[in-house]
């Protein structure tokens, strides 16, 4: 008989925050290519969503470190479903007949500009994030066993570096190849990888604080010693 599932006070809140960050960073920020002038590097192109998307990996690290890989996998599938629903909803709203008036004509043009490519962004995001985030969780869970729970910073940064490499290798090429110039797609993908990984490094003190808080409050510090790491399940 399976042991009863533990109740966690904060898991649902982190799950909700995780899904919100994933939706907003992909549908509000991902479509805009921004530029910034940096010392020594010159003009750097990057996707605007990069400012917020790494927060999803921040939450993923916390979920795996505290609750275990299965809880992170469940969150990834929840984000996957949310992105799918948002993409379908966007296409239905765009396809609906437009009401009369100049305002609604302008509004429809704005919707098509912002969300007309949402299906492609959503598919690219779902595939790349699903691969990258589950890779991130797998690497962190394994590193936690290898380090016997020590050196948290090595596994949060190391797992993010691997997961973001997988994510960045897919997303911008799948989402924007043929829409943006190819050299810009490559520049943005490289900048995305470097900036996302750097974000995790800078967030390390916050990661330590949140992880220690949750471990203390939840009385949980899970080790994935006997975990089934298949990505194709939702059960925890």
Image (spheres, rainbow, N blue to C red):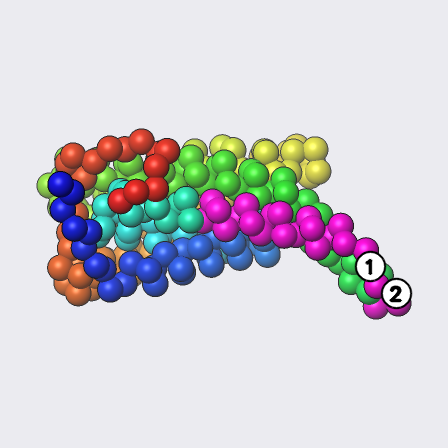
Q: Is residue 42 left or right of residue 76?
A: right
Residue at 47% x, 45% y is 80
Q: Identify the disc placed on residue 98.
A: 1
How far apart, in angstroms, are the residues tagged by discs 2 and 1?
Answer: 7 Å
Image quadrant containing the C terminus: top left
**Main SS class of the magenta portion in the image:** helix
Q: Is residue 23 left or right of residue 161?
A: right
Tell me the magenta residue range: 79-103
Task: Report if the CB atoms under discs 2 and 1 are less than 8 Å apart.
Answer: yes
Q: Is residue 4 left or right of residue 15?
A: left
Q: Specify whether residue 191 is in view.
A: no
Determine which quarter of the picture holds residue 2. top left
Q: Position of residue 161 (x, y in %)?
A: 36, 39
- Kindly state the secondary structure of the residue where label 1 is placed: loop
* Residue behind mark 2: 100
Residue 29 lies in the magenta stretch: no
How would you rate the neighbour count of disc 2 (Cα within 10 Å): few for under 14, some for 14-19, many for 20 or more?
few
Up/down of 48 relative to 213, above or below: above
Residue at 34% x, 54% y is 59
Residue at 69% x, 51% y is 92
Determine which quarter of the picture holds residue 122. top right
């Amino acid at each position: 008989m399976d042991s009863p599932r533990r109740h966690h006070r904060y898991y649902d809140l982190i799950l909700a925050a995780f899904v919100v960050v994933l939706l907003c960073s992909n549908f509000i920020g991902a479509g805009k290519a921004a530029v910034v002038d940096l010392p020594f590097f010159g003009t750097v192109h990057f996707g605007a969503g990069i400012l917020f998307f790494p927060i999803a990996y921040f939450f993923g690290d916390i979920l795996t470190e505290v609750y275990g890989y299965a809880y992170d996998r469940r969150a990834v599938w929840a984000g996957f479903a949310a992105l799918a629903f948002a993409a379908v909803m966007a296409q239905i709203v765009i396809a609906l007949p437009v009401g009369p008036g100049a305002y609604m004509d302008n509004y429809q043009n704005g919707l098509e500009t912002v969300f007309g490519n949402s299906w492609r962004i959503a598919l690219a995001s779902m595939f790349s994030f699903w691969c990258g985030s589950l890779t991130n969780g797998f690497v962190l869970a394994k590193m936690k066993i290898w380090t016997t729970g020590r050196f948290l910073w090595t596994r949060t940064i190391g797992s993010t570096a691997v997961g973001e490499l997988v994510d960045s290798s897919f997303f911008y090429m799948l989402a924007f190849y043929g829409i943006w110039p190819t050299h810009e797609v490559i520049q943005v993908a490289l900048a995305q990888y470097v900036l996302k990984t750097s974000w995790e490094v800078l967030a390390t003190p916050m990661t330590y604080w949140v992880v220690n808080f949750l471990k203390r409050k939840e009385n949980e510090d899970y080790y994935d010693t006997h975990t089934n790491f298949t990505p194709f399940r939702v059960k925890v």
